[in-house]
Image (cartoon, helix red, strand yellow):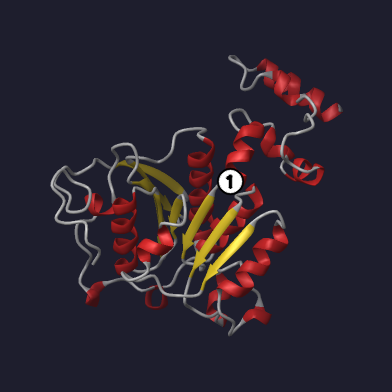
Amino acid sequence: MARRRLAWHLLHLLDPPLLDPHLLYPLPMQPGSGFSGEELERYARQLVLPGVGVEGQRRLKAARVLCVGAGGLGSPASLYLAAAGVGTIGLVDSDRVSLSNLQRQVLYGTPEIGAPKTAPARVRLETLNPHVSVEPHQVALAAGNAVDLLGRYDIVLDCSDNFPTRYLINDTCVLLDKPDVFGAVFMFEGQVSVLGRRGGPCYRCVFPEPPPPEIEPSCADSGILGALPGIIGAIQAAEAIKLITGVGEPLVGRMIVCDALAMTFRELGLPRNPRCAACGERPAGRALP
């Protein structure tokens, strides 16, 4: 109680106040909220947030979010989605855990080396929060299964690590009218944006064509700072939670670029391209590549 009183006084001194002081003393949950007592305690710090509350938590519980990639970005993103109470989390990844993954892929530990990634990932996420359901898809995303897989979910997180998959995710999300929460990391730099929403750009608006395969950057060749995917993946999870609950302003038409060496964040404006081959006024066919 002493801490709350101190917080109240500190917030009250701000002009204008940062928060309504009464939010520090939330009313007890009423019966019939749709959550068990254990869930109410688990999400207590989230339930008191302005704009979230019980209704926002209900939306999270009802939401279905797909992470394409259960590696460096998918690990922190899926962990925070599960912790927040997103009811159903899908994981698409065809790889197995390798020793070199463990420097950044925090879903896994040494005992999981050699295992198909989605199996231990499911155990880890459902152990973190037994109130969520994890749907593993131990397959590579391809043109033949993209519509079926992405169509089962409300939001797609692009946690992939190669350009063909990014374009496939984008084109499928445009086709299905699904939000594409894009993240990418390379060496010391990360990018994150919300694509294909409210008149904002899609991935092809920003990057019309992939680079030639011979100059495509590789994590194995160039390296990556292990903590960087944690930063970008956590932002992806935050953007998905905002989209689900309706709180805040998502990164639509904006891209955050993180330079981990200087620890700076830049915001870039991303205009929609009316001539975009995927989402433009005259798309060049909606067939998937």
Vertical placement of residue 13 versus 119, above or below: above
Q: Residue at x 29, y 53 (%)?
A: 175
Q: Secondary structure at mark 1?
A: helix
Amino acid type, residue under disc 1 in the picture: Ala
Q: Residue furthest right?
A: 1
Quarter of the image that includes the N terminus: top right
Residue hosting label 1: 62
Q: Residue at x 79, y 24 (%)?
A: 6
Q: Position of residue 103 (x, y in %)?
A: 57, 72
Residue 262 visible: no
The quarter of the displayed image where residue 245 is located: top right
Label 1 crowd (10 A; few <14 / some 14-19 / many >=20) = some
Vertical placement of residue 255 versus 77, above or below: above
Q: Is residue 289 left or right of residue 84?
A: left
The quarter of the displayed image where residue 36 is located: top right
Quarter of the image that includes the C terminus: bottom left
The quarter of the displayed image where residue 219 is located: bottom left
State the residue in front, 254 or 116. Answer: 116
Q: Residue furthest bottom?
A: 114
Q: Position of residue 67 (x, y in %)?
A: 48, 60
Q: Position of residue 190 (x, y in %)?
A: 41, 56
Q: Position of residue 51 (x, y in %)?
A: 58, 29
Q: Residue at x 77, y 30 (%)?
A: 29
